[in-house]
Image (cartoon, helix red, strand yellow):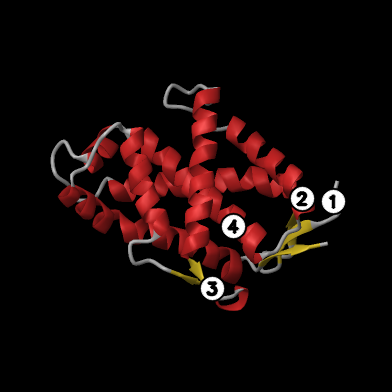
Amino acid sequence: MTNGKFVFHKKGSETLTPAQYGYFLVRWSFDLAKASVEIIKKVECRSNGLISKVKISPFAAELQYTAVYVAAYLIYAIEICHAPESINNELNKGVDDGIKDLRSPSGAPYDQELVDFFKASFALYYKAQTKDIKSDVDSRVFNIDFSNVAKDFVEMLSRSYQYTTDAQELFEVLTALNIGVSNGVLSTYMTLKDEYGLVFST
Protein backbone atom coordinates (compact mmCIF):
# COMPACT_ATOMS: atom_id res chain seq x y z
CA MET A 1 0.00 0.00 0.00
CA THR A 2 1.30 3.45 -0.91
CA ASN A 3 1.73 6.21 1.62
CA GLY A 4 0.66 8.78 -0.94
CA LYS A 5 -2.58 10.71 -0.74
CA PHE A 6 -4.63 13.24 -2.64
CA VAL A 7 -4.67 16.62 -0.92
CA PHE A 8 -7.34 19.28 -1.48
CA HIS A 9 -5.30 22.34 -0.49
CA LYS A 10 -8.16 24.80 -1.03
CA LYS A 11 -10.64 22.66 0.90
CA GLY A 12 -8.92 22.84 4.26
CA SER A 13 -6.17 20.45 3.12
CA GLU A 14 -8.61 17.53 3.25
CA THR A 15 -7.00 14.28 2.13
CA LEU A 16 -8.17 11.11 0.41
CA THR A 17 -6.33 7.85 -0.05
CA PRO A 18 -6.13 6.63 -3.68
CA ALA A 19 -8.89 4.11 -2.95
CA GLN A 20 -11.09 6.82 -1.45
CA TYR A 21 -10.44 9.12 -4.40
CA GLY A 22 -11.35 6.31 -6.79
CA TYR A 23 -14.57 5.65 -4.92
CA PHE A 24 -15.65 9.26 -4.61
CA LEU A 25 -14.81 10.19 -8.20
CA VAL A 26 -17.53 7.76 -9.30
CA ARG A 27 -20.00 9.42 -6.94
CA TRP A 28 -19.00 12.90 -8.12
CA SER A 29 -19.22 11.80 -11.75
CA PHE A 30 -22.70 10.40 -11.26
CA ASP A 31 -23.92 13.69 -9.76
CA LEU A 32 -22.42 15.66 -12.66
CA ALA A 33 -23.97 13.22 -15.12
CA LYS A 34 -27.47 13.72 -13.71
CA ALA A 35 -27.09 17.48 -14.14
CA SER A 36 -25.72 17.08 -17.68
CA VAL A 37 -28.64 14.89 -18.75
CA GLU A 38 -31.05 17.56 -17.52
CA ILE A 39 -29.33 19.98 -19.91
CA ILE A 40 -29.77 17.55 -22.82
CA LYS A 41 -33.49 17.40 -22.05
CA LYS A 42 -33.73 21.11 -22.88
CA VAL A 43 -32.06 20.78 -26.29
CA GLU A 44 -34.25 21.35 -29.34
CA CYS A 45 -34.25 18.19 -31.45
CA ARG A 46 -35.92 16.40 -34.32
CA SER A 47 -38.69 13.97 -33.43
CA ASN A 48 -37.58 10.34 -33.20
CA GLY A 49 -33.93 11.43 -33.39
CA LEU A 50 -31.06 10.51 -31.07
CA ILE A 51 -31.63 13.32 -28.57
CA SER A 52 -35.34 12.57 -28.42
CA LYS A 53 -34.42 9.00 -27.41
CA VAL A 54 -32.27 10.40 -24.61
CA LYS A 55 -35.22 12.46 -23.38
CA ILE A 56 -37.51 9.42 -23.37
CA SER A 57 -35.01 7.04 -21.75
CA PRO A 58 -32.14 8.98 -20.14
CA PHE A 59 -30.33 6.14 -18.37
CA ALA A 60 -27.94 5.27 -21.22
CA ALA A 61 -26.94 8.94 -21.57
CA GLU A 62 -26.50 9.18 -17.80
CA LEU A 63 -24.15 6.20 -17.93
CA GLN A 64 -22.11 7.75 -20.76
CA TYR A 65 -21.86 11.10 -19.01
CA THR A 66 -20.77 9.36 -15.82
CA ALA A 67 -18.05 7.60 -17.81
CA VAL A 68 -16.91 10.92 -19.32
CA TYR A 69 -16.49 12.45 -15.88
CA VAL A 70 -14.84 9.35 -14.40
CA ALA A 71 -12.24 9.67 -17.17
CA ALA A 72 -11.79 13.37 -16.37
CA TYR A 73 -11.15 12.74 -12.68
CA LEU A 74 -8.73 9.93 -13.51
CA ILE A 75 -6.88 12.04 -16.07
CA TYR A 76 -6.47 14.83 -13.57
CA ALA A 77 -5.07 12.42 -10.98
CA ILE A 78 -2.73 10.57 -13.31
CA GLU A 79 -1.75 13.02 -16.04
CA ILE A 80 -1.93 16.35 -14.21
CA CYS A 81 -1.22 15.45 -10.58
CA HIS A 82 1.32 12.86 -11.77
CA ALA A 83 0.16 10.29 -9.24
CA PRO A 84 2.59 7.34 -9.43
CA GLU A 85 1.72 4.00 -11.03
CA SER A 86 2.13 2.41 -7.60
CA ILE A 87 -1.32 3.73 -6.61
CA ASN A 88 -3.13 2.23 -9.61
CA ASN A 89 -4.33 -0.90 -7.82
CA GLU A 90 -5.81 1.10 -4.96
CA LEU A 91 -7.26 3.70 -7.31
CA ASN A 92 -8.88 1.01 -9.45
CA LYS A 93 -10.25 -0.77 -6.39
CA GLY A 94 -11.89 2.47 -5.31
CA VAL A 95 -13.41 2.93 -8.77
CA ASP A 96 -14.70 -0.66 -8.69
CA ASP A 97 -16.27 -0.06 -5.27
CA GLY A 98 -17.88 3.12 -6.58
CA ILE A 99 -19.32 1.29 -9.57
CA LYS A 100 -20.87 -1.28 -7.21
CA ASP A 101 -22.96 1.53 -5.72
CA LEU A 102 -24.35 2.60 -9.11
CA ARG A 103 -27.89 1.47 -9.91
CA SER A 104 -29.84 0.70 -13.06
CA PRO A 105 -33.32 2.22 -13.57
CA SER A 106 -34.81 -0.82 -11.79
CA GLY A 107 -32.74 -0.06 -8.72
CA ALA A 108 -30.53 -3.11 -9.18
CA PRO A 109 -26.72 -2.94 -9.21
CA TYR A 110 -25.12 -2.98 -12.65
CA ASP A 111 -24.83 -6.50 -14.01
CA GLN A 112 -21.41 -7.63 -15.27
CA GLU A 113 -22.21 -6.79 -18.90
CA LEU A 114 -23.12 -3.23 -17.94
CA VAL A 115 -20.04 -2.90 -15.71
CA ASP A 116 -17.84 -4.03 -18.60
CA PHE A 117 -19.53 -1.59 -20.98
CA PHE A 118 -19.14 1.25 -18.48
CA LYS A 119 -15.43 0.51 -18.01
CA ALA A 120 -14.89 0.30 -21.76
CA SER A 121 -16.66 3.65 -22.11
CA PHE A 122 -14.51 5.53 -19.63
CA ALA A 123 -11.36 3.93 -21.07
CA LEU A 124 -12.41 5.30 -24.47
CA TYR A 125 -13.05 8.75 -23.01
CA TYR A 126 -9.72 8.68 -21.20
CA LYS A 127 -7.96 8.23 -24.55
CA ALA A 128 -10.13 10.89 -26.19
CA GLN A 129 -9.49 13.46 -23.46
CA THR A 130 -5.77 12.74 -23.60
CA LYS A 131 -5.85 13.59 -27.31
CA ASP A 132 -7.74 16.80 -26.57
CA ILE A 133 -5.20 18.06 -24.07
CA LYS A 134 -2.50 20.19 -25.70
CA SER A 135 0.78 21.77 -24.53
CA ASP A 136 2.51 21.05 -21.22
CA VAL A 137 1.33 20.45 -17.66
CA ASP A 138 1.55 24.12 -16.71
CA SER A 139 -0.61 25.38 -19.56
CA ARG A 140 -3.11 22.68 -20.39
CA VAL A 141 -5.40 23.67 -23.24
CA PHE A 142 -8.50 21.66 -24.04
CA ASN A 143 -9.62 21.63 -27.66
CA ILE A 144 -13.38 22.18 -27.68
CA ASP A 145 -13.83 22.51 -31.46
CA PHE A 146 -15.72 19.23 -31.95
CA SER A 147 -13.44 17.60 -29.41
CA ASN A 148 -12.51 13.94 -29.58
CA VAL A 149 -14.41 13.29 -26.37
CA ALA A 150 -17.59 14.88 -27.77
CA LYS A 151 -17.34 12.86 -30.99
CA ASP A 152 -16.82 9.65 -29.04
CA PHE A 153 -19.67 10.60 -26.72
CA VAL A 154 -22.11 10.92 -29.62
CA GLU A 155 -20.85 7.65 -31.10
CA MET A 156 -21.35 5.86 -27.77
CA LEU A 157 -24.80 7.39 -27.38
CA SER A 158 -25.71 6.05 -30.81
CA ARG A 159 -24.47 2.60 -29.83
CA SER A 160 -26.28 2.73 -26.52
CA TYR A 161 -29.60 3.59 -28.14
CA GLN A 162 -28.94 1.33 -31.14
CA TYR A 163 -29.54 4.31 -33.38
CA THR A 164 -27.80 5.39 -36.55
CA THR A 165 -27.60 9.11 -37.34
CA ASP A 166 -27.38 10.39 -40.90
CA ALA A 167 -24.69 12.94 -41.73
CA GLN A 168 -26.97 15.93 -41.16
CA GLU A 169 -28.28 14.72 -37.81
CA LEU A 170 -24.77 13.76 -36.70
CA PHE A 171 -23.67 17.34 -37.31
CA GLU A 172 -26.75 18.68 -35.51
CA VAL A 173 -26.20 16.45 -32.49
CA LEU A 174 -22.48 17.22 -32.33
CA THR A 175 -23.23 20.92 -32.57
CA ALA A 176 -25.82 20.64 -29.80
CA LEU A 177 -23.72 18.53 -27.43
CA ASN A 178 -20.10 19.42 -28.21
CA ILE A 179 -19.76 22.49 -26.01
CA GLY A 180 -21.67 20.91 -23.13
CA VAL A 181 -19.60 17.72 -23.12
CA SER A 182 -16.27 19.46 -23.73
CA ASN A 183 -16.89 22.26 -21.26
CA GLY A 184 -18.08 19.72 -18.70
CA VAL A 185 -14.69 18.04 -18.90
CA LEU A 186 -12.82 21.33 -18.80
CA SER A 187 -14.92 22.51 -15.86
CA THR A 188 -14.01 19.34 -13.96
CA TYR A 189 -10.30 20.02 -14.48
CA MET A 190 -10.67 23.65 -13.49
CA THR A 191 -12.68 22.83 -10.37
CA LEU A 192 -10.04 20.39 -9.20
CA LYS A 193 -7.29 22.90 -9.90
CA ASP A 194 -8.74 26.29 -8.96
CA GLU A 195 -11.44 25.51 -6.38
CA TYR A 196 -9.95 22.46 -4.71
CA GLY A 197 -6.21 22.85 -5.31
CA LEU A 198 -5.91 19.09 -5.76
CA VAL A 199 -2.40 17.60 -5.69
CA PHE A 200 -0.94 14.19 -5.01
CA SER A 201 1.48 14.07 -2.11
CA THR A 202 3.81 11.25 -1.09
The first of marks 3 and 1 along the sequence is 1
Q: Which residue is mark 2?
A: 87
Q: Are marks 1 and 2 in contact (CB under 8 Å)?
A: yes
Q: CA distance from mark 3 to mark 4?
A: 12 Å
Determine which of the numbered discs, if any, sits on residue 2 in the image: 1
Residue 88 vs residue 36: left or right?
A: right
Residue furthest left in the image:
47
Check disc 4 and report its element: helix, strand or loop: helix
Check disc 1 and report its element: helix, strand or loop: loop
Say which of 201 and 120 sits in front.
120
**Label 1 crowd (10 A; few <14 / some 14-19 / many >=20):** few
What amino acid is at disc 1? Thr
Q: Which residue is mark 3?
A: 140
The first of marks 1 and 2 along the sequence is 1
The correct choice, above or below, for 94 with respect to 184 in the image is above
Q: CA distance from mark 4 to mark 1?
A: 19 Å
The first of marks 3 and 4 along the sequence is 4
Q: CA distance from mark 4 to mark 2?
A: 14 Å
Task: Confirm whether residue 69 shows in the render.
Answer: yes
Check disc 2 and report its element: helix, strand or loop: helix
The first of marks 2 and 3 along the sequence is 2
Say which of 51 and 78 sits in front.
78
What amino acid is at disc 2? Ile
Indicate the position of residue 200 as horizontal and vertical percent values.
74, 62
The correct choice, above or below, for 192 with respect to 41 in the image is below
Q: Which residue is mark 4?
A: 75
Indicate the position of residue 39 as horizontal and vertical percent values.
32, 51
What amino acid is at disc 3? Arg
The first of marks 4 and 1 along the sequence is 1
For image coordinates 24% across by 49% down, the residue present is 42
